[in-house]
Amino acid sequence: MRSFKYSCKPKIISELDPSFRPIALANAKYLEAVMKSDHPEPVTIAIERDQGIQSIYKTFVFNDSQNQFGSNAFYIERLVKSLLWIKGGWKIIFGGPKSVGEYLKQIYKKNGLLEFDRAFMSRIYEKDFVVEVTTSDQIKESNETSKPLGRHLDGYRIGFDAGGSDRKVSAVIDGVPIYSEEVIWHPKLQEDPNYHYQGILESMKTAASKMPRVEAIGVSAAGVYINNRVMAASLFIKVPEDLFDIHVKDMFKNIAKEFGDVPIVVANDGDVTALAGSMSLEANQVLGIAMGTSQAAGYVDQKGNITGWLNELAFVPVDYHINAQVDEWSLDFGCGVKYFSQDAVIKLARYGNLEIDPSLSPAEKLKHIQYLLGKGNEIAKQIFDTIGIYLGYSIAYYADFYDINKILILGRVTSGEGGLHIIKNAKQVLETEFPKLAKQIQLTLPDEKNRRVGQSVAAASLPIIKDRK
């Protein structure tokens, strides 16, 4: 089921990607048709993660009598995928038409259509992935929880942000960064985990040399981290599985021992992005989106807490067009990584026939396109305008899952003029297509300094320093 007859053209169309078909518009059109049909059928979806926590989502589909199985299956398949990567979980409990539930079982079985998703969730939650089919009224209510993250500013701290193209580190004393640096590296190309270990250690030692002592280390990195252990991370994508288990899972814990076994907290970079936004804006209900090597996201709720969700928007669909670009890792189409990252910039440069030296690394290609933007290149401008269009429509979809007042946009892709073009076009989409959301949600960019190093400073606030002398 890879096409959806309810897909429709947006009002604001990108010159570089006119085939873009936003999910928010298509789902709204589908649900309008469902609710006008005879006897729309209620659906309840539960996604269960660790400790029995369940996230609940309720919607409707066509009754089987309407002969709309293909549309139902596509809508639910994309919705469940979104829920999995936003909330995280090892079990899907589907309460709805049995035909759709059986379809979910097929695509999530071993070596099925969504094998990457199944295997990923099984690995990080260390449980066999399960799809259960029941009726909507048999699924209990959500038992979601949230917990505080960071905001500890006392003492001598190192904040480290592990990006796919550069690593950033800050030395922070009582909440004030006294030193920050960025170092280009290429972790996604390296099979030897010692490359990662030594690179991280070198940056941290540089920061440590700027302070009398180190009392805590906070780490922001793409991936899934449980109890400061690396469960899955694209930074180590080339590391063989046997070496990963031996040398990567406890890498950050081992690095902390190099500094006297000081407290260390490792968090997903998306959550740290949201934390940085919440701290700088002095606000909650913040969705942070970092556009760099990939797309990272995090969310701070109305209490100022994190939810424990995965928030892996890189794998959440945003485009329903059948020929949308396929992500090389997940082998799925139309997902965020190809719309909100340096990959998106390079993709759009190709669509615009913008010549770029193929020998350059992805980070260097991005930097070159940003340089061209500064020189007034029209294709470069259209690239960042298009990412803004993508973002505006995708925010409308994200708002189905997050209660958002503010969105903070960070990451290398947003540096310089590009970030301003992204924000401008995203706001235009919201004002044109989703005026209610336009009034509710404020999009913001941090200043240039915080945009590039704010992540590592926020990371420094993650650990609690106990028993200070």
Image (cartoon, grey):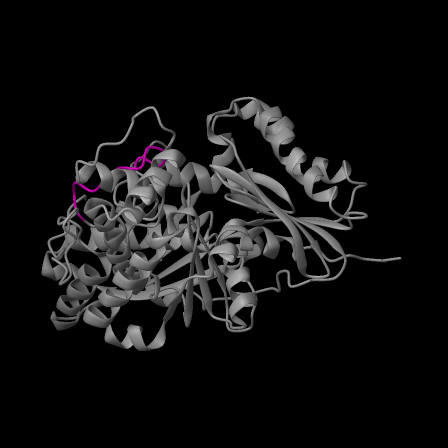
Compared across the picture, whether 381 is left or right of 274 comes to left
Q: Residue furthest right?
A: 469
Residue 306 image position (x, y, % from top left): 55, 62
Taking the spot 12% from the left edge, 69% from the top edge, the residue there is 37
Q: Is residue 281 visible from the viewing direction of this image?
A: yes
Image quadrant holding the N terminus, namely: top left
Q: Main secondary structure of the magenta part?
A: loop
Q: Which stretch appears magenta? A: 321-331
Residue 360 image position (x, y, % from top left): 36, 28
Image quadrant holding the C terminus, namely: bottom right
Compared across the picture, whether 161 is left or right of 8 comes to right
In the displayed structure, would residue 11 be above or below residue 330?
Answer: below
Taking the spot 33% from the left edge, 52% from the top edge, the residue there is 418
Residue 27 image position (x, y, % from top left): 21, 61
Q: Is residue 62 visible from the viewing direction of this image?
A: no
Choose between 444 and 3: the one closer to the eye: 444
Q: Classify residue 445 by image quadrant.
A: bottom left
Choose between 453 and 17: the one closer to the eye: 453
Count of labels in the image: 0
In the displayed structure, would residue 61 be above or below residue 320?
Answer: below
Q: Residue furthest front?
A: 375
Q: Is residue 70 magenta?
A: no
Taking the spot 31% from the left edge, 35% from the top edge, the residue there is 331
Compared across the picture, whether 110 is left or right of 451 comes to left
Residue 197 image position (x, y, % from top left): 63, 30
Compared across the picture, whether 37 is left or right of 53 comes to left
